[in-house]
Amino acid sequence: MSKNIQSVRGMHDVLPADVKPWQQLEHSLRSLMHAYGYQEIRLPLLEKTELFARSIGDVTDIVEKEMYTFEDRSGESLSLRPEGTASCVRAGIQHGLLHNQIQKLWYMGTMYRHERPQKGRYREFSQLGVEAFGLGGPDIDAELIIMGARLWRELGLNNICLELNSLGTHQERATYREALTEYFKSRFNELDADSRARLDRNPLRILDSKNPEMQPLIGIAPVLSDYLGAESSSHFQGLLERLNKAGIDYQLNPRLVRGLDYYNLTVFEWTTNELGAQGTVCAGGRYDGLVAQLGGSATPAIGFAMGLERLLALLQKNTEPQPAGSPDVYIITIGEAAEAGGLSFAESVRNILPGRSIVYHCGPGGLKNRLKRADRSGAELALIIGDDELAKQTVLAKPLRNTTDSQLEVAEAALEDYLKTYFINR
Ligand code: ATP
Ligand code: MG
């Protein structure tokens, strides 16, 4: 006996009964982007592997061990996108959107990382990504954060906290990196295997360790803020002032370094303690060097990415479950003659009720069975045409939810008025 094929580990179907919260969240996100004047950009799922190696960094977790990389039929190395920033920058350079321009862009879609699947961590997951190009001052940093705060407020989520840090310039980070390497080398015996591996290649990543046993050691490591120059400090102060003015609470976290190489100056994460270990719902930062690094002209940039599965899990904890969508009208035709005109009748009902959901019953079944299906669909109203109605040019309208509304035989000519009135307040 052959076994049924299952979905790929870490990749999930969203079944019809679960799709509503997704749609609502996507709608909220689109409205948010519109409210701030950001424009949507749609990017491919596949890119040349080199793009990610050159942007995210060769010695990051993502590029070293999480990418879905393969050779296509012509032998070119391609990867499923593990994140969207690299593609967005690539597209911006390729289409001349970035040179001497300001662009505020967003995208939404699936990302792919070969990680160990667990709650809140999947191999296919969705992100909203927001990127702003051409703006070097702290006001855009603040705007992106204010935008996040508005979203949490609109979604009714009040248990999301902001953590902030500044990574300074690459030069400042290099000096800090030396100090950090020195420190961890002197405590080499206390490092776990992961951290030892990171020590030479990317010591800042040790600060990002999720191993609780490493935390005391990390807690007393040198901090980056002590290595920031005047300009970096003033950018960071500028951001903090704007957040204070906007009434946004934050926590300074000198250990926040983010897992990607391309960040500089501002980095931030929105986290919650309601989701266990996978508590970061949104993360971002400034990446002023990336556009030039990928071949464009030097362009300041900042962005963030939001994990939609984590956000939905949080929403589910904080809001009442919503019923799956039901149709407004369920149309039943009975008998060969009525059935022959059924689909075009359904079209005319859709013309009368734009935006409403109209289901036409296809397939076999007697009247009783069809009515049962109409009822189970959750529809407000059934419209029934049998031989009798066809002969009299009428339609039987049967309210299914509100039993105080009685069943009515409506002349076809009067159907438009009837339907419009019926649905006026529903
Ligand atoms: P983490 O530290 O949790 O691995 P990250 O720093 O790798 O996160 P980013 O690359 O900054 O994550 O992605 C931004 C957001 O996307 C994360 O904050 C999280 O909400 C979400 N995200 C990242 N990886 C996954 C995943 N494997 N499954 C589900 N959501 C994810
Ligand atoms: Mg990760």
Image (cartoon, rainbow, N blue to C red):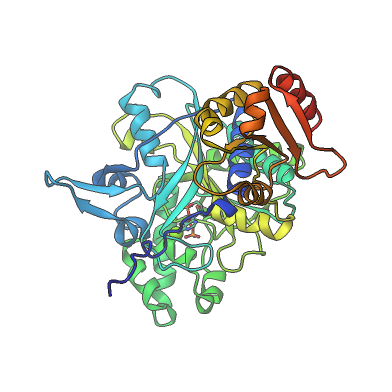
Q: Quadrant of the C terminus?
A: top right
Residue at position x 21%, y 53% from top? 70
Q: Residue furthest right?
A: 404
Q: Does residue 96 lie above or below 175 as drawn? A: above
Depth check, front residue: 117 or 272? 117
Give the tally of numbered discs: 0
Q: Position of residue 136 (x, y in %)?
A: 51, 30
Q: Quadrant of the N terminus?
A: bottom left
Tell me if 31 is positioned left or right of 190 in this view.
Answer: right
Depth check, front residue: 235 or 359? 359
Residue at position x 39%, y 38% from top? 289
Q: Does residue 337 lie above or below 363 as drawn? A: above
Tell me if 187 is positioned left or right of 369 in this view.
Answer: left
Image quarter for residue 396? top right
Q: Residue furthest bottom?
A: 189
Q: Position of residue 323 (x, y in %)?
A: 69, 51
Residue at position x 76%, y 37% from top? 245
Tell me if 258 is positioned left or right of 390 in this view.
Answer: left
Q: Is residue 102 visible?
A: yes
Residue at position x 51%, y 41% from top? 362
Q: Position of residue 258 (x, y in %)?
A: 48, 55
Q: Is residue 220 visible?
A: no
Depth check, front residue: 3 or 46? 3
